[in-house]
Amino acid sequence: MLQDFGKFLGMFLLVLFSFTIGLTQLYDKGYTSKEQKDCVGIFCEQQSNDTFHSFIGTCFALFWYIFSLAHVAIFVTRFSYGEELQSFVGAVIVGTYNVVVVIVLTKLLVAMLHKSFQLIANHEDKEWKFARAKLWLSYFDDKCTLPPPFNIIPSPKTICYMISSLSKWVCSHTSKGKVKRQNSLKEWRNLKQKRDENYQKVMCCLVHRYLTSMRQKMQSTDQATVENLNELRQDLSKFRNEIRDLLGFRTSKYAMFYPRN
């Protein structure tokens, strides 16, 4: 779910920055009107193309335009009669932005969320089984005896654990303890190696069992397998050889009765 939101946010920012750069390059003239020196961007009472003289102003205008908080007049305002083409191009850019963001990206977000929900719904049985197993295993874990906030008070079991761990720490700093610790490290490494080997064996057995079950399922449903294809190929080759022999024999036989001119 978070990955889908990240992808959508990246595409939205890419589209927003692309149209922002285009409108800024289109309307950037390098001057501001004298009557609107005190207002900035979309906060001016009389909107004009001065909003698009900066990258930030254009970005704000396009962002709020999605929520209908910026009027389309700020994109098509003309300063003089000779700017009709510039105004038309700006209106086309904003219309394209509206179609891409409001229609395409919004529908894309809905489709991505629907796909994520469908994946979750398809695996809800497995998720429920794992959650139930995790809940049952939590009852057998060696954790706190009392629930919070009563676990703040040390229990007799906690005191025994503290004493045993302290005694092990003291014994580990003696000469015998150091030798024993080295031996325990070797045993731990051997045990870890055995666990890895057992894990590999179990995984190989699982893969072999899966392949065997799939092969049996395909054979039971009369689906084509590699062995079936090889048998069919051999039968076809035998049939072709027999047909060749038969046709060759008949050709030689009829050639006796119908000699060539």
Image (cartoon, grey):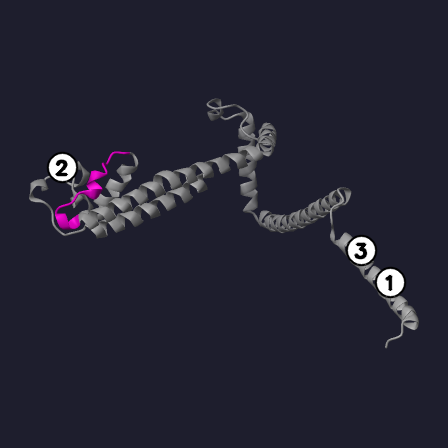
**In the image: residue 216, left or right of residue 30:** right
Q: Which mark is residue 242?
A: 1
User: Which residue carries the number 2 mark?
Assistant: 46
Mark 2 touches mark 3? (CB < 8 Å): no
User: Which residue carries the number 3 mark?
Assistant: 231
Name the outermost residue toward the left: 34
Give the alpha-carbon distance from disc 2 to disc 3, as whole Å.
Answer: 84 Å
Front residue of this view, candidates 26 and 21: 26
Name the outermost residue toward the top: 150
The magenta-colored residue range is 68-83
Give the alpha-carbon distance from disc 1 to disc 3, as whole Å.
Answer: 17 Å
Label 3: few (<14), some or many (≥20) within 10 Å? few
Label 1: few (<14), some or many (≥20) within 10 Å? few
Q: Could you tell me which secondary element the residue under label 2 belongs to? A: loop
Q: Could you tell me which secondary element the residue under label 3 belongs to? A: helix
| 112 is within the stretch colored magenta | no
Q: Position of residue 15 (x, y in %)?
A: 34, 47
Q: Amino acid at mark 3?
A: Glu
2 or 3: tag closer to the N-terminus: 2
